[in-house]
Image: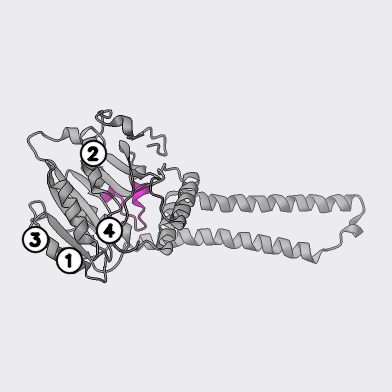
Amino acid sequence: MSQDDGDTSTSRRVGASDEGADPAMGAGAGAGQVLADTKMVALDIVVPLYNEERSVESFHQNLMRVTTPLAFDVMIYYVNDGSTDATATILGKIAGADGRVVVIELSRNFGHQAALSAGLDVTKGDVVITIDGDGQHPPELIPEMLRLFENGYDVVLTQRNDVRQPAFLKRSTSAVFYWLLSRVSDTNIIPGCADYRLLSRGVVASLKEMPEYHRFLRGMVAWLGYRTVILPYSEQPRIAGRSKYSLKKMIGLAMDAVFSFSLVPLRLGIALGACFLLLALFEVVYVLWYWLRGEQQLLVPGWSSLMFMILLAGGTTMVVTGFIGIYVGYIFQEVKHRPVYVVKSLRGPGSRRDEGAPGPEA
């Protein structure tokens, strides 16, 4: 995956011709091939949830159906992101009946990226998969993701194809978002790759060293530059309910992505200021030309043109000041060092990896 500062990391897309073929080896520390043969690989699955009372049980059954036959030591971390329905009660029943389930209760709704971070901070496994709990990410992809991990990849991204088109609004905003981000950011973020991904322990450890408050995990994972492969999939219908990702939340995520990974808005402000300075210089030359020819009487002040320039310059100044204000606001929120999330409780019937382990970093 092409990164800034001359990084030569690459990402590879898995297609139909890759069935049964082994991807190139040579990943860094943390990839599957460095694990001892005598040790069962520990797989942690992080599932953020917000008001999914109608779908969580079906999702858990589907996930168990896929993961139970795997030759991995599986733990599932459900992150309840401040749900106001019966999601917490249902998760408590699931955890009570299944010793592989840990429930992380956040004190309120902190957002999807914060919930994912809470789950990643708690995990201890050799490999971690993050997946949404609404059923749109097919768990059936997990065995193939693990195969790619064992063949040397530290990051396995899943990329939604266009077989099942999302709603027009979501499709349009997503296209605009990735188009804009690809032009203002030095980090190569692949369109259609959401938060259904596999990460090696080394990648998760690196993410924990990035404590920024405004989190855009797709960009953070891409910025790290680990060896990456892309696995296409067809998005499934939601098990139940409607998407909780409103337009407001999508705009907020887009702002976090743009302002966290690019200084282009500030450079754009400088460019606009330079353009107006150039126009001012042309105006000076124009007026001097009339004065040198002795035709200054032809220079009749024009109220409309004057107002146009004032409004245009004032509007540009306000835009640039707004960009600066956003960056100052981001800095202000960072320097307060508030936690990205707050864990209210961590419930589970004493997992073999969590006993005596410290709580999640906030």
Label ID, residue 97: 3
For the residue marked with disc 4, what is the amino acid? Ile
Q: Which is more toward the observer, 315 or 154?
A: 154
State which mark lies toward you, 3 or 4.
4
Indicate the quadrant containing the C terminus: top left, top right, bottom left or bottom right.
Answer: bottom left
| Magenta stretch: includes residue 212 | yes
In magenta, the rendered stretch is 205-220
Q: Which residue, given by chain and number where applicable, does mark 1 sit on? A: 90
> Closer to us: mark 4 or mark 1?
4
Q: Which residue is mark 4?
A: 239
**Residue 196 is at least partly visible in this image:** yes
Label 2 sits on residue: 144
Q: Residue at x 38, y 35 (%)?
A: 7
Q: Earlier in the sequence, mark 2 or mark 1?
A: 1
- Pick the residue in front: 182 or 202: 182
State the separation of the CA atoms marked 4 and 2.
23 Å
Q: Residues within 10 Å of mark 1 (few under 14, many from 20)?
A: some
Residue nearer the viewer, 299 or 163: 163
Give the CA separation, mark 4 to mark 1.
16 Å
Q: How is the image coloured?
A: one colour
Q: Earlier in the sequence, mark 4 or mark 1?
A: 1
For the residue labelled by badge 1, is the local secondary structure a helix, a strand or a loop? helix
